[in-house]
Amino acid sequence: MKVASWNVNSLNVRLPRLLEWLASAAPDVVCLQETKLEDGKFPCAEIAGTGYTAFYVGQRTYNGVALLVRDAIGTATEVTTALPDYIDEQKRVIAATINGVRVIDFYVPNGQSVDSDKYRYKLDWCSAATGYLKNELARHERVVVAGDFNIAPEDRDVHDPGLWAGQVLCTDAERAVFRRWLDLGLADSFRLFDQPPKTFSWWDYRQLAFPKNRGLRIDHILLSPTLATACRASWIDRNMRKGEKPSDHAPAIAELAL
DNA sequence: ATGGCTGCTTTGAGCAGA
């Protein structure tokens, strides 16, 4: 079972690239973030035409998440579209049970800057998410948490750690959240394997950041212990950052022997 | 060394992303 996560930065704009990528990469489950679409405008028919069924919760302009499930892998049950016990207008969570695996798709708030209300919101949101993950891990043996975490977990996930030190995405508090989630028993699938240094998942559109590889690794796929044992590979498809109209994020992918 | 790009917005210059 191949699981992928991709922040598309507008599904409207990215739909042609998404359809090509579904055909070429053939993931079984895809977690999308930043669809920026109201539910009534979600392109169900186009996606169904490629052999996937979509589950989604969105809003216009901002946020929005979706799960795409390859029809051949089975159907999704127990679909939920929010953190429980946390009131939030913003559509940032979707989860479902697919082929015996609980798949949780997060679009963690960006936080903007450390002195902003949005940073406070990010940390509050993450606290609620911690409780949610703890419960989900108690209820399910096989759990995937995938998405845009907006956290670069370590300095090696940052092109220039000195430049980013103390900045949003790299603060101690955000990194502590990431470690807390690992402490719940989740493994960062990417770090289960030897990886090329300076592997990133996001590059700014400005300043030739991608050709200069000035990026961050902020898109992650975490696995519960059983799934970590079953994980055969985990990588970032940086080729998706190239070409016409790329998202500023590249997909993260994990291959599970299930 | 500001912002430098992209997508979105009751189409405009401003917000947000990261």
Image (cartoon, rainbow, N blue to C red):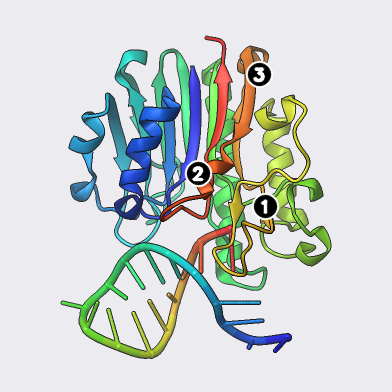
Q: Residues within 10 Å of mark 2 (few under 14, many from 20)?
A: many
Q: Nearer the viewer, mark 1 or mark 2?
A: 2
Q: Chain of mark 3?
A: A
Secondary structure at badge 1 equals strand
Secondary structure at badge 2 equals helix
- Position of A219 with respect to A15 (left or right) is right
- Which residue lies under the disc numbered 1? A216
Give the alpha-carbon distance from disc 3 to disc 1, as whole Å.
23 Å
Please tell me which residue is depicted at 18% across the width and 36% down the height of the picture.
A45
Instruction: Answer above or below: position of A129 versus A144.
Output: below
Q: Residues within 10 Å of mark 1 (few under 14, many from 20)?
A: many
Secondary structure at badge 3 equals helix
> In the rendered structure, which disc, 1 or 2, sits on the residue that comes first in sequence?
1
Instruction: Answer above or below: position of A95 versus A241.
Output: above
Residue A87's spot in the image, x, y percent? 42, 52
Give the alpha-carbon distance from disc 3 to disc 2, as whole Å.
25 Å
- Position of A226 with respect to A145 (left or right) is right
Q: Is disc 3 in contact with disc 1, using a CB cutoff of under 8 Å?
A: no
Please tell me which residue is depicted at 20% across the width and 50% down the height of the picture.
A41
Q: Nearer the viewer, mark 3 or mark 2?
A: 2
Please tell me which residue is depicted at 44% across the width and 36% down the height of the picture.
A31
Residue A122's spot in the image, x, y percent? 57, 57
Q: Is disc 3 in contact with disc 2, using a CB cutoff of under 8 Å?
A: no
Q: Label 3 sits on what residue type? A: Ala
- Position of A106 with respect to A76 (left or right) is right
| Outermost right residue | A162
Disc marking residue A240: 2
